[in-house]
Amino acid sequence: MSRPDTQPGVALVTGAGTGIGRAAALALLADGWRVALLGRREQPLRDVAQEAGAAGRALVLPTDVTDPAAVRQAFDRTAGHFGRLDLLFNNAGTSAPAVPLEELGVEQWRGVVDVNLNGMFYCLQNAFRLMKSQSPRGGRIINNGSISAHAPRPQSIAYTATKHAVMGLTKTASLDGRKWDIAVGQVDIGNARTELAERMTQGVQQANGEIASEPLMDVDIVGQSVLYMANLPLSANVLFHTVMATKMPFVGRG
């Protein structure tokens, strides 16, 4: 594993208060990891720490990932509190309304880019900074790509463009991290049951224009996928891991 054998590893999870971030944080805490919980709202982060029953191993850090100074401060506070950083789950993300691309507002476009691409880069950059300088050096970074990193949904140009860009972040950081013992991979998730994804059961637009209900999978499965990747030795890396509802319309022709 990436962490020193003498004590539990240290993870930082962005978007940790809800959905996929929450599931990953709970899985890590249940496995004994010490976890810094980052998100915009403090109360959901505190709820995760309380649910895990791991107050001593959970550090609540309300943080806006679009603010580079706030991100740096959160990473420094994590290292100061726990002594190091072994894992970053780079998860925070957002989307824009499903409208024709010519109707998407500039501020809506910038809002998605600022969280999904810029925010992810700020976190990636600070993780590298800490992991290169600590002893023993190195660690692991897992970026949340989404299956939209591979194929779009209709009327999703901002979300899809940023998730394609995340793939570029993952590949480049994986290459740049080699000599520093930093393993970088990506989890691509399809239809995990979260509050945001629940609408898919009521019907979502397909590539042919039809509206169809789509199956969902338990979000805790994603938490276990992140935990599996997190617990690999640094000599091994899952570069891309796709986990999805088996019968969702992703592969094939819909």
Image (tube, grey):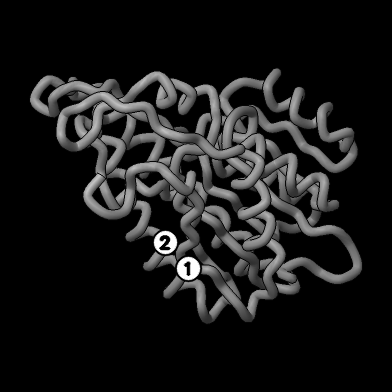
- Would you place residue 48 above or below residue 179 in this image? above
Q: Is residue 156 left or right of residue 87?
A: left
Q: Secondary structure at mark 1?
A: loop
Residue occupying image coordinates x 47% and y 39%: 68
- Would you place residue 184 above or below residue 222 in this image? below
Q: What kind of residue is marked 2?
A: Thr
Judged from this view, the residue extending furthest toward the left is 102
**Do the CB atoms of the residues marked 2 and 1 lie less than 8 Å apart?**
yes
Q: Nearer the viewer, residue 53 or 194?
A: 194
Q: Which residue is mark 2?
A: 170
Percent of width and height locating residue 25? 70, 41
Q: Is residue 206 visible?
A: yes
Q: Is residue 243 left or right of residue 13?
A: left
Q: Which mark is residue 239?
A: 1
Residue occupying image coordinates x 46% and y 70%: 174
Q: Quadrant of residue 98?
A: top left
Name the N-terminal-most of marks 2 and 1: 2
CA gap, disc 2 to disc 1? 8 Å
Percent of width and height locating residue 146? 41, 46
Percent of width and height locating residue 203? 34, 22
Q: Is residue 46 left or right of residue 213?
A: right
Q: Nearer the viewer, residue 241 or 137?
A: 241
